Amino acid sequence: MSFFGPYGPLDADDIAAINTVARFLALDDLGGRDTHNAPAFDLVVLAGNALLWTLEGAVKKARTANVPLLISGGIGHSTRLLAAAVDAHPVYRKALASQTSEARLLGDIAAMFLGLDQSLLLLEDASTNCGENGLFSRRVLDDTGLAPTAMLLVQDPLMQRRTDASFRQAWTNATCPAIVNWPVQVPRIGYRDDRIDYLQSPNSRKWTPERFLSLLTGEIQRLTDDENGYGPRGKGFLPHVDIPDDVQAAWRSIMRSGKFDTAALGRPAGG
């Protein structure tokens, strides 16, 4: 089938455009580097989101490097989706899904099921969006006296580039630790068993096609530095972000194709 959820029929150009935008958003500083060439870090930061495999990846990196893990997230756009993902998980659903913040719920899972030493766990549970993830994470580090030289930053891949910009914005009046971005995986769609699906994606809960396309298109609008975006020429939430010409062309192709519910594309979703 050439449909991606309710969207389609999609052709090779549609799929290529979607993957071009996704690859840009999922900023990845580790890529395929082997352990010997990977950048060093002395803190892992996970920005709360609804994809449990980002937590698993963050915990694994923190345990392997024996460094603290800071989980940032209060109640925001992703909280309901995170609670649903936990409730649907065969193991993690034993955690307290009624926790009052993303950080506390994810922290419970990290300690209860993923073997993270609680002495290495820091929680920031007041932020409601990407910008506050950065600002309030800095506040936690300042309050605890931690001064990392480099942080490994993990987020929903489609929000990775904006989260990187938000953290850099949070340190505009001070020296920002080096940021090593790692979205755990770079999403890509294509044909699997005669239908369009995610390729090379963890087996646990993924985005619905509707949320995927909403985030994918909305993030480009937020990152665009114009009067409607979040950059210096717009709302001022972010530093300037360069969007390559091929990514802008791919985004325009998606928006103008007529194969997607334009009322759903670009709407706020994900903090």
Image (spheres, helix red, strand yellow):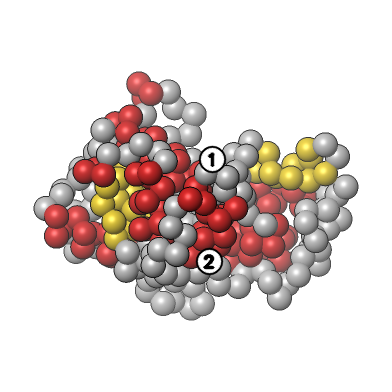
Q: Is residue 173 left or right of residue 28?
A: left
Q: Position of residue 184 (x, y in %)?
A: 49, 40
Residue found 11% across the figure and 53% down from its top: 145
Which quarter of the figure has residue 135? bottom left
**In the structure shown, which secondary structural element does the residue marked by tag 1 occupy?**
loop
Q: Which residue is mark 1?
A: 185
Q: Which residue is mark 2?
A: 80
Frontmost residue, 186 versus 18: 186
Q: Position of residue 235 (x, y in %)?
A: 41, 77
Frontmost residue, 130 versus 61: 61
Which quarter of the figure has residue 150? top left
Q: CA distance from mark 2 to mark 1?
A: 23 Å
Q: Position of residue 131 (x, y in %)?
A: 37, 67
**In the structure shown, which secondary structural element does the residue marked by tag 2 occupy?**
helix
Label 2 Cα neighbours within 10 Å, binned few <14 / some 14-19 / many ≥20: some
Which amino acid type corresponds to the residue marked 1 in the rendered image? Gln
Residue found 26% across the figure and 44% down from its top: 118
Residue found 83% across the figure and 44% down from its top: 195
Q: Earlier in the sequence, mark 2 or mark 1?
A: 2
Question: Can see residue 124?
Answer: yes
Frontmost residue, 101 versus 263: 101
Residue at far front of view: 94
Above or below, 73 against 154 in this view is below
Q: Which mark is residue 4?
A: none
Residue at far left of view: 145
Which amino acid type corresponds to the residue marked 2 in the rendered image? Arg
Residue found 55% across the figure and 56% down from its top: 87
User: Which numbered disc, 2 or 1, marks the residue closer to the eye?
Assistant: 2
Above or below, 28 against 83 in this view is above
Label 1 Cα neighbours within 10 Å, binned few <14 / some 14-19 / many ≥20: some
